[in-house]
Image (cartoon, coloured by chain):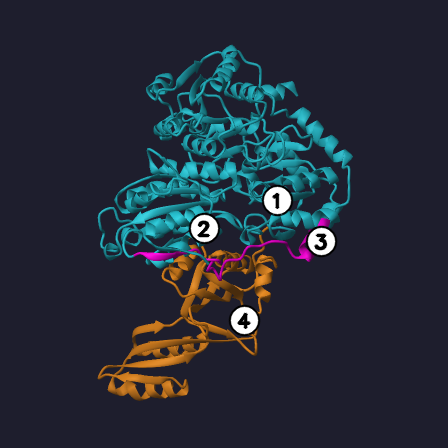
Chain colours: A orange, B cyan
Amino acid sequence: MIQTNHKEQHTLIALVEDKPGVLTRVASMFRRRGFNIASLAVGKSEQPGLSRMTFVVNGDDYTVSQVAKQLDKLIDVIEVADITNESIVTRELALIKVKTTQSTRGEIIQIVNLFRANIIDVGSESMVIEITGEEDKINALHNLLSPFGIIEMLRSGVVAMVRGQANGLANGHIHNQLIGNGH
Amino acid sequence: MESTGELTGAEIVCESLLKEGADVVFGLPGGAVLPLYGALSSYPAIRHILVRHEQAAAMAADGYARATGKVGVCVATSGPGATNLVTGIAAAHMDSVAMVAITGQVPRAYIGRDAFQETDVTGVTLPITKHNILVMDVKDVAQAIHDAFHIARTGRPGPVLVDIPRDVLLGEKAEFVWPETTKLPGYKIPGEAPEAQVAAAAELINQAERPIIMSGHGVLISHAYGLMTELAEKAQIPVITTLLGISSIPTDHELNLGMSGMHGMAYANLAIDEADLIIGLGMRFDDRVTGRISDFAPNAKIVHIDIDASEVDKNVMATVGVVGDLNAVLAQLLPKIQANVHIDWLRHIQELKTQHPSHIVRESDELLPQYVLQRLTEVTQGRGIVVTGVGQHQMWAAQHCQFTEPNTFITSGGLGTMGFEVPAALGAQVGCPDSVVWSVAGDGGFQMTMCDIATAVESGADVKFAILNNSSLGMVHQLQDIFFEKDFVASEYTANPDFVKIAEAYGIRGIRVTKKDEVVDAVQQAMETAGPVIVDFMVKEDEIVYPFIPSGQSVKEMLEEPANKEIA
């Protein structure tokens, strides 16, 4: 009866109150309902007192619609939208600390330049590379650097934004699908 | 805006409770919450009922809320006081009961230092409350209480916990300013549903040949029983109630098929199996209702109307999901519904009822628990309130007690909390002092919370306790009987106390019943006696609750009362 198909990964954004415990409430809901977060990024929004969260969630349409509805039910969550099928831009930031030797340093710098990434720290046997971009681009750089030996990697998680005039949330169209029009 | 000058946090709590119309609180004091008790004595309009165990405070608040439709309030101190509330809060959460729990917390400077009687109570209760609030400033107390009551009673109701450190209750004072509005930008309360959803639901209902209404707790919470019955009568649709939907339609209404599900009426389950449309109203297709999901109502489309959007498509995929307040949605829906008679369908259901008479109690010389409840409900004529715990006695009460008025069957459904019957009955009686309240108990659950008989006596709560005493954990015993080769490990009580003497010890009347012909007299005597009474019905042991659809199975695996099968 329950349909299982469609995209395996969905991108959800949420506007939430910037209060202690909100992240715990969100994370706890994911855990207790057995939902799987692939990545989560949180930060201040354009509105004082409110934060934006970007979730990448593994699951089919059915699961993700449950995630969205359960998120929306949390009192501190103001709005939720599944923007997977919208026209969106996504970015992720990664810091990658890679092993270097005199003989590999030049090749690594070439790769970094090719990706328009930045070297933000250089040591005698390592360097720290900063890259911003879509997940695929970061994965590609990671793959190329792996043979040199990655000492440490940190990824911020994906942040996403709808293109154009809309802010993804405040027009309320996704909201209406979730809870009906009553207030 | 109005102001009453500078008050302590504790006084602001009391002022706020009055503003919210909370005239009864159930609680038990302790160090961290003591400043609130210090203020309570200056507020005689708030009646405090002192329990013997905080679990009873939460469950009494629950029973009070369900019986009255108001918000139930309980109070406990930090640490163990608050953790003792947890089972009662979880029960209220599962059953969508409007409750506000106020807990004391250690002073702010001690939080996070493992102070004496410190527990992270907002952390502990996070998954079992609709919301919770830790108040860290006396200026936020009034807003927190206002928000808590608003969240608890609106939308899909639920428990809200407000945790207040001792030095916020009794430290710096603040002006009491009652907030005009809530401060909850993320909180939405559905009202009417989108017309398109309602129209789609109406179309399915008008087309259906074998429709069934499944009436849940939401029908009671939303006061939608009138419109639900109107819908049923207008289109002649039989009504099945969930466990928590019992009393949303009178038991003797000709369209009422009673409860369905694991221990539901056989004909109700068979009707669902054959239905071409299930209209789920304010219910959540719980696994006790559906059995194996893939075999539930295999021939039916589903119209699911609920105030909680996350319930739609959660367990059962709805053909049409309608999100809104049930009473408002039914008002939108009714004009679109065509009158119908469904003669063939109703006749067929009548046949099912004749062939599978699970509402009939078999003839026996022994004192059957089902027989006790049938006589009890005859004497009370279906009036008053029945409160149960969890287990066999609960299922028999759901099957055999009669109800005429809404909100008169109070039971722990979702969480299945043994021991609920004593404190919840106390709360219901406090909330409805003019009603006869019967606490139908099992001997197992009764012993979990019987310390609060003292609370009933002290507070003048005239509860009548009917213990269906089979000297065992009957439901466990039944499962062992059927699924564990009669290995009755840890389910038989060999040294139960003498409940008549327990009654006497609490200064109330106790009556023991061992024979069928003593039942009616005992019930009448209990009702004629002022104050609480315990009636100890020594019922037949190892009786099985039929019908029975084992967990995770379907109506095809349903076990029926052997004697009734023979009748058919």
For the record, the magenta segment spans B173-202
- Between label 1 and label 2, give the one nearer the viewer: 2
Label 2 residue SS: loop
What type is the residue that disc 3 sits on?
A: Ala
| Residue at the spot of label 2 | B130
Badge 2 vs badge 3, beta-carbon distance below 8 Å:
no
What type is the residue that disc 2 sits on?
A: Lys
Q: Are marks 4 and 3 on the same chain?
A: no
| Residue at the spot of label 1 | B281
User: Which chain letter matches label 4?
Assistant: A
Count of marks, rendered view: 4
| Residue at the spot of label 3 | B199
User: Label 2: few (<14), some or many (≥20) within 10 Å?
Assistant: many
Where does residue A1 sit, x and y in percent of width and height? 60, 50
Badge 4 vs badge 1, beta-carbon distance below 8 Å:
no
Mark 4–mark 1 Cα distance, whole angstroms, equals 33 Å
Label 3 residue SS: helix
- Which numbered tag is attached to residue B290? none
Q: Are marks 2 and 3 on the same chain?
A: yes
What type is the residue that disc 1 sits on?
A: Leu
What type is the residue that disc 4 sits on?
A: Gly
Where does residue A4 sit, x and y in percent of width and height? 56, 57
Badge 1 vs badge 3, beta-carbon distance below 8 Å:
no
**Any magenta on residue B383?**
no
A19 lies left or right of A124: right
Image-quadrant location for residue B534: top left
| Residue at the spot of label 4 | A168
User: Label 1: few (<14), some or many (≥20) within 10 Å?
Assistant: many
Residue A138 can be seen in this image: yes
